[in-house]
């Protein structure tokens, strides 16, 4: 029998699950070449504008395979619906049976992205985090911060966003969750005060300039996941001691690193894959003066691992 | 809210729906170029052997898009499970919301394939059908025959299968449904007696030879859907007055027609697409001496149309 889980059920169990551990395992399998993840399927719509991505794959010799369908319809807020939607389906790798349909409305994608940010911080953030800089005020601006709680006790946050209203709402919301949040006047101010910076915006021209960043800073960029989007000036990569991506093959064609590669600021062999970094201490931060940048465009193994983890928790 | 329909609910409403009309509409939209159907996604498994196909697409300016996940795990019968499984998901083309998950276990794929056979027979079968020849004894051997009931009153059936046991079971089952079924000793005998022949086997070397077929016969081939499979000798296409496929682009790379094209027995411009044939009387059978062959490899628009039809019936 196929089980069907609704958003609320999924939401409730997430805090009970060690997602960090499960998704780390996924990154390791991915970097070891033990995953099968074909190219993403895509459907595009014009009126109203929307895009749908179908990601699917499995870890070899595992019990499951996963198919995720995720959509963004950007005029949805006009009719009081969230832009993003989607679901995950878990199947048996032995019989093909659909074991579970997770009607998560895109939540699991948001969470697995935030968890990847936490994993990156675990291995690359400076020992002592002064303040956390959050660029953007959307879903990832919230979740990335919240999922850092297991990595650092730091509750000092500087936020920057283009829309003052959104910044205000963000501040209020995160203050009630025990953070001390200040709004930066500009990106430069944020970069001066923070040594752990998370960028979460879908901008097309860089917000963070090369001269904004001081040695000893770690930046995780999660906003750019296409060929065009770019949050960080390509030149900054020349200053980075550690450059990490969730997927070597993807960072060659999309995200921040791809811009730096194209401009020949760095070469691909300077870029390390997160699954390798997790396993090899030499690829992790070794001192607090290093500058590190992690660029996350998202890999299907995260979807596989989070869906499995939720299913297994609910069926233990 | 996403609705979830189980196999039984789906099964019950199918006889109430005019599937032929809906799937015909789909073929027309497909041949008019009004559908968006990206390449099929695929996952392959070795131990145990299995394959998964992900088909997805939409009709332009329609209300929906559909994703289908269909699997074949060929050792399932050892553990008393059917080889085929799968589900269909219907989404809104306006907001991306998943409207319905159809846990059909592959039934809708079987049915839409049978309905395509009936549509082909409607336009290409001889006016007077003497006997219906069924090659094979599996699911399509049953469904193709059953869905011909709206096209022809003929209840005289000749069946051929490699396994006498399966032939026996087939005979008994179809006799209880009002058919008069005889088993042929060989394919030649079947071809001699029948002027409407449906081939449903996944064989790798042709069963039907060029000299088996008399003028005035129509053949629908549904068994071959890969590059390798072949039920009909390529030479037979030289004798055909009408050659029809559900998809010009697919018949170029897989199925029966692709073998005939490769051997240069026919050229691609002799092949007509079902959606065109439905709309243009000149492309349909015009007399009972014509020999016609239709090769069906299955197109996603059939999945789109059957899923929509079931959803709309259940939500009217």
Image (spheres, coloured by chain):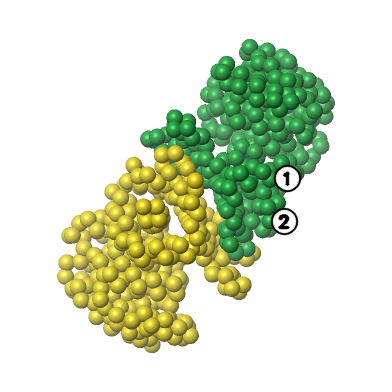
Chain colours: A yellow, B green
Give the quadrant of the N terminus of chain B.
bottom right
Q: Is residue B293 above or below residue A53?
A: above
Rendering quarter of residue A276: bottom left
Q: Is residue B300 above or below residue A249?
A: above
Q: CA distance from mark 2 to mark 1?
A: 12 Å
Relative horizontal placement of residue A266, taking residue B159 as reference (left or right): left
* Mark 2–mark 1 CB contact (< 8 Å): no
Instruction: Report the front residue among B61 and A254.
Output: B61
Name the element at disc 2: loop
Tell me, yes or no, if residue A260 can be seen here. no
The earlier-in-sequence mark between 2 and 1 is: 1
Q: Quickly name the residue at label 2.
A: B316
Numbered disc total = 2
Name the element at disc 1: loop
Labelled disc at residue B17: 1
Labelled disc at residue A77: none
Instruction: Report the front residue among A314 and B235.
Output: A314
Point 58% across, 59% down: residue = B2
Question: Residue A116, how many percent across, how many down?
Answer: 34, 63
Point 72% across, 56% down: residue = B316
Instruction: Report the front residue among A144 and A271.
Output: A144
Point 44% across, 62% down: residue = A10
Label 2 resides on the chain identified as B
Relative horizontal placement of residue B249, taking residue A113 as reference (left or right): right
Question: Residue B27, how many percent across, how many down?
Answer: 70, 43
């Amino acid at each position: 029998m196929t089980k069907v889980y609704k958003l609320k059920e999924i939401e409730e169990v997430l805090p009970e699950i060690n997602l960090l551990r499960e998704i780390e395992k996924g990154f390791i399998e991915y970097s070891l070449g033990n995953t099968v993840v074909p190219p993403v399927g895509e459907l595009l719509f014009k009126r109203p504008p929307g895009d749908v991505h179908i990601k699917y794959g499995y870890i070899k010799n595992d019990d499951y395979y996963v198919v995720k369908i995720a959509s963004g319809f950007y005029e949805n807020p006009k009719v009081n619906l969230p832009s993003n939607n989607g679901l995950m389906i878990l199947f048996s790798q032995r019989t093909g049976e659909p074991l579970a349909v997770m009607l998560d409305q895109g939540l699991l994608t948001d969470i697995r992205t935030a968890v990847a940010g936490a994993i990156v911080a675990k291995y690359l953030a400076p020992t002592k985090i002064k303040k956390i800089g959050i660029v953007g005020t959307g879903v990832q601006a919230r979740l990335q911060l919240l999922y850092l709680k297991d990595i650092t006790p730091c509750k000092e946050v500087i936020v920057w966003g283009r829309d003052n209203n959104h910044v205000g709402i963000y501040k209020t919301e995160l203050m009630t969750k025990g953070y001390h949040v200040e709004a930066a006047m500009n990106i430069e101010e944020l970069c001066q005060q923070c040594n752990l910076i998370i960028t979460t915006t879908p901008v097309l021209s860089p917000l963070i300039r090369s001269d904004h960043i001081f040695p000893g800073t770690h930046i995780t960029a999660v906003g750019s996941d296409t060929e065009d989007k770019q949050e960080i000036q390509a030149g900054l990569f020349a200053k980075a001691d550690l450059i990490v991506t969730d997927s070597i093959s993807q960072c060659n064609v999309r995200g921040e690193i791809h811009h730096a590669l194209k401009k020949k600021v760095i070469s691909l062999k300077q870029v390390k894959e997160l699954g390798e970094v997790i396993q090899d201490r030499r690829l992790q931060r070794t001192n607090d003066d290093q500058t590190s940048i992690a660029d996350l465009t998202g890999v299907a193994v995260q979807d596989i691992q989070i869906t499995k983890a939720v299913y297994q928790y609910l069926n233990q």
